[in-house]
Image (cartoon, rainbow, N blue to C red):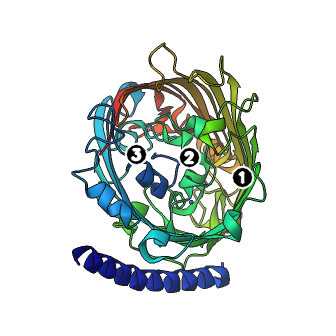
Amino acid sequence: MKKKLITTWLSSAMTAGLSALVSFGMMSIAHAQTAPESTPPAEPASKAAADSNAAPTGFWEGSTLLGDMGGLRPLLGQYGVTFALQETSEYLGNLTGGTRRGGAYDGLTQLAVGVDLDKAIGLAGGSFNVSALQIHGTSLTQRNLQTLQTASGIEGDASTRLWELWYQQTLLGGKADVKIGQQSLDQEFMVSQNAAPFINATFGWPALPSIDMPAGGPAYPLSTLGARVRVKPSDAWTVLAGVFGGNPAGSNTGDPQQQNAHGTNFNLHNGALVIGEVQYALNPPPENPAYQGASSGLPGTYKLGFWYNTQHFADQRFDNTGRSLADPTSTGIPKSHTGDYSLYAVADQMVWRPSAEGPRSVNVFARVMGAPGDRNLIDFGVNTGVTLKAPFNGRDNDIAGIAVGYAKIGSHARDLASDTAALTTPGYPSRSAETVIEATYQCQLTPWWILQADAQYFFRPSGGIPQPYNASSRIGNEFVVGVRTNITF
């Protein structure tokens, strides 16, 4: 009787919630299509939630610290409910250069709940996901570095906020699916799996969209309403396309994270963001684990994509009369450009492994993207790196890696710095590009606990901006070291 009452209650609640969410999502799609004008794990939160519910074999061997929580996880699993709780904490310190030396602690608590609607209410192919973030600590980048490529992918304003809230429906016998609701694009678009172990944010959501898109784009810690379609015509090919709100903050002024302080600013009034991506999987591993060693080829994934934002964007050099913004007679009102866009390519490739059955492998990645130089602070970006999995015998899940991030200052922003030196501030430094090199070692102490050591070196922070106390001297190169710990509960 008790189980029947629980089942009845869950079914009623999920039916009502699903009806509201579907209606809300359909209105969101219609609004986005008719409008006048995107460093956490890359996989969707629902998958992470499902993985965290695997039955443990012991305290140190289980996939989660809390195991099955006294039978609660298996009980909820009977009704299709899974959840994941994860804490990431780190301390990063700037040893040289920057605007000041010193260190900072920052942390992130992630909670995700997923519901398999087939198990919950009999809706085949349907799933629901909601996730929240609790960000704490201080941003080293804002306080000490002033870099374009943020030192850590979990840095953000201290807050508790909704992150994602969406409904997904599988179609065409599993060949396609549609997702509607509040989404963070860094979970599916522009993703490089081989770049995931690195701490710097540019190896997750790259610096180019983070700097050029309004409010940094719909990516951690912000998200936006929209709809995404995924079609998989074959095992090798996947196509992603989506339409989303153009500005996740809802405002073009002020701190975006303060403008949308709790992630509940469901805004579709600031233009639209259209994004698409085509993926090709080379030598994809078989879906059946029993045949993991069947393919002798080295797996890889290659992606081509674009994004277009319909809003208006300020010129990085000229005002609305054609004068340089550095000119003392300038109006100070930048020339306006309609729309902004970028093209990008991503490659992940395993290049060596001694055995198809063993854990050791060498993997490389590269990500290249470009955007117009007149309306963007960054007009070209590159990420590339190499990782070694299982570097030592007995350390099957450890990862060592080194990577480089490059962010080139747009042509008009470079010219504005030259204008400033010529017209108002002699000796004002020129701007070119910012480069970061990161070396990291990720040690998996237990399946649920990862400890990571990290070092980063920044050349020409922000491409060569001046010190705040001396406009004739640029911010010096920076050396950042730190440690991160990640625990899955």
Give whichever of 75, 205 is nearer the camera. 75
Q: Is residue 431 visible?
A: no
- Please identify the quadrant where the C terminus is shown: top left
* Residue type indicated by callout 3: Ile
Which SS class for mark 3? Answer: loop
Q: CA distance from mark 3 to mark 2?
A: 38 Å
Q: How many marks can you see?
A: 3
Q: CA distance from mark 1 to mark 3?
A: 25 Å
Q: Nearer the viewer, mark 3 or mark 2?
A: 3
Q: CA distance from mark 1 to mark 2?
A: 29 Å
Q: Which residue is mark 1?
A: 371
Q: Residue at x 71, y 70 (%)?
A: 172
- In terms of sequence position, does the residue under pointer 1 or pointer 3 come before the other? 3
Q: Which residue is mark 2?
A: 424
* Residue type indicated by callout 1: Ala
* Residue type indicated by callout 2: Thr
Q: Residue at x 30, y 61 (%)?
A: 75
Give whichever of 65, 274 is nearer the camera. 65
Task: Return the x and y of residue 231 as percentages of the image width and height.
Answer: 72, 63
Q: Nearer the viewer, mark 1 or mark 3?
A: 3
Which SS class for mark 1? Answer: loop
Residue 118 horizontal side relative to residue 316, left or right:
left
Give whichever of 51, 377 is nearer the camera. 51
Place residue 320 in its image quadrant: bottom right
Badge 2: few (under 14), some or many (20 or more) residues near its Cα, within 10 Å?
Answer: few
Q: Is residue 365 visible?
A: yes
Which SS class for mark 2? Answer: loop
Q: Which residue is mark 3?
A: 154
Q: Residue at x 63, y 23 (%)?
A: 362
